Image (cartoon, rainbow, N blue to C red):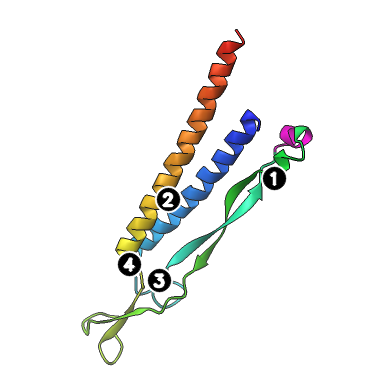
Amino acid sequence: MSFMKTLDIGASALSAERTHLNVISMNLANVNTTRTPEGGPYRRKTVLFQATPVETPFGKAMQSELERELRGVKAKSVLNDNRPFKMVYDPGHPDANNDGYVQMPDINVVEEMANMLTAMRTYEANVASITTAKSMFQKAMEIGR
């Protein structure tokens, strides 16, 4: 595996995890949003990841068939979670129905925080792999001196 291929794979993972963290922060910011421009409460969002080939113009020309099996990752899309809304009794709320219940987003803060920790650890692991690859490349360059 070439040095640049290692960096490309790590960079694709960093980009995908950044998107994941942005979606988690949107979910946490809208945990109490009962009215959106689309109408109704905020819908929790999730990220769909997809394996993607790692290709650069130079690397594409130099790849062997074995290296073609290497894949990076990308955030394919951001999807709405179709969980039902929570019904909370709050008759004084401006969005309460005739029975006094308000539809709230079904966002579990503990679940979102666990997802955030997982995304952060994944991000850190990819940074560590890039740093290790960079260190190995520097050591190889020192051997060549």
Query: Residue at left 76%, top 32%?
Result: 62
The residue to which callout 2 is attached is 119
Distance of label 3 from label 1 (alpha carbons): 40 Å
Q: Which numbered disc flags the more N-terminal residue, 3 or 1?
A: 3
Query: Residue at left 72%, top 34%?
Result: 59
The residue to which callout 1 is attached is 69
Distance of label 4 from label 1 (alpha carbons): 38 Å
Q: Is residue 58 a member of the stretch shown in magenta?
A: yes
Q: Residue furthest bottom?
A: 98
The residue to which callout 4 is attached is 108
The residue to which callout 3 is attached is 42
Name the side, left or right, on which 88 lies relative to 134: left
Distance of label 2 from label 4 (alpha carbons): 17 Å
Residue 69 position (above or below residue 105): above
Q: Nearer the viewer, residue 112 or 125?
A: 125
Residue 142: percent from the left, percent from the top? 56, 12
Q: Secondary structure at mark 1?
A: helix
Q: Which numbered disc flags the more N-terminal residue, 3 or 2?
A: 3
In the image, the segment drawn in magenta is 56-61
Distance of label 4 from label 3 (alpha carbons): 13 Å
